Amino acid sequence: MGKARIALLSNPNSTGNLSQLPRIRAFCAEHPDIFHYEVEKADQVGEALKTIARVRPKVLAINGGDGTVQAALTELINGDHFGDSRPPVAVLPNGKTNLIALDLGAVGDPVEALQRLLTLADGDLSDHLVARELIALTSDGREEPVIGMFLGGAGLADSMLFCRDKIYPLGLPNGVSHVLTALLVLLRQTFGLTNRFLPPSPSPIEVKVRRLGALRGRFQLLAVTTLEKLLLGSEVRTAGKGRLKLLAIDHRSSSLVRGLFAGFTHRLGAKKLSGVHVEEADEISIEGDRSSVILDGEMFEARIGQPIRLTPAKPLSFVRLAA
């Protein structure tokens, strides 16, 4: 096979692709230097990258939600399809909770983003490349780590699942869905309500941070990330003591309001706040009684005696699409 400027990996089953994929297919048909490969399941990504490696693309673009991106990153790190010459990764704006695309400046129309990527790939990409640390998730019984960039646990995982199952089907815009979910969490917290129309209360968990000890209790929000931006556009300021950023907010209304306000005003981590824990580490473990965590769209379960372990993975180069 000849060399393509861009190899595009698409997931037709991604929510955002239900309406956009026909336009993307038409755009690719008009540009023969784009090699377009579609997968319908995560277990097809390995074979897809094996084929894509044969066209030696200058950029690997991913068109799908966070789950699709996670499957591709996992295969890029664990597989040996490209040897030591892995192409930089670009993420098109697509999917419902595509935090990775947001962090890399991919917003708006995916076809316009693909056009910009094509223009960038025609020249020197070096000024548009950024290195991103990755998270490696391991647990008992798992042969190879799963690779991602954002993990949500405790009440955040419960809220993400609630948003996915209860709010997204209403057909509201993504931003409105996320704000509505946050408001419902605050409503439950403030008035102590329990209702099937509200997100559930979080279960107790233990989070161990190497060198810093353990956090135990109920947390309304638990996040581990290598991203610069979190949900709702908030950012975490850290001191550079580890590659994994940890944010945990206690299960109290005052702590949640304090943490959310600091996030919205871009002051999260700038100073210590009661009930708001911001740390950095190179190793984190999460243990709980069947407590769910979500890594870039895929759910895992932390159990007592069977913790989920998070460590840094090899960094990859990504293409920042923002002008």
Image (cartoon, helix red, strand yellow):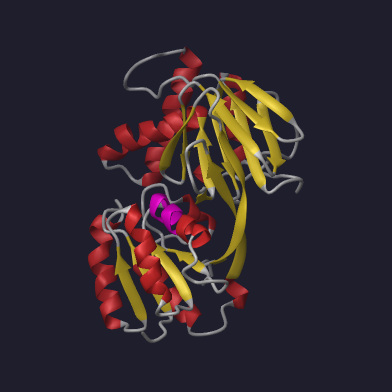
Task: Please identify the quadrant where the N terminus is shown.
Answer: bottom left
**Residue 267 position (above or below residue 54):** above
* Residue drawn 58% across the image and 31% down it: 286
Residue 67 sits inside the magenta stretch: yes
Q: Residue furthest bottom?
A: 2
Q: Where is residue 159 in the image (x, y as percent from the top left)?
A: 43, 31
Q: Is residue 219 left or right of residue 177?
A: right
Residue 170 sits in quarter: top left
**Residue 150 location (% of width, % of height):** 53, 45
Q: Principal SS element in the magenta part? A: helix
Vertical order, 27 against 142 (above or below): below
Magenta-tinted stretch = 66-72
On the question of residue 29 being in view, the answer is: yes
Counting every numbered tag in the picture gives 0
Residue 322 percent coordinates (x, y): 52, 66
Question: In x, y percent, where is residue 8?
Answer: 37, 70
Rendered residue at 42%/54% (across/down): 71
Residue 67 relative to residue 104: left or right: left
- Seen in the picture, residue 47 relative to 220 is either above or below; the reply is below
Residue 230 in sight from this viewpoint: no
Residue 103 painted magenta: no
Would you say 323 lies left or right of 98 here?
right
Is residue 258 or residue 289 the one in the foreground? 289
| Along the line of sight, the residue nearer the viewer: 194 or 50 | 50
Relative to 181, say whether 125 is above or below. Answer: below
For this rendering, which residue is in front, 164 or 302? 302
| Image quarter of the C terminus | bottom right
User: Residue at the location (68% across, 49% down)?
Assistant: 243
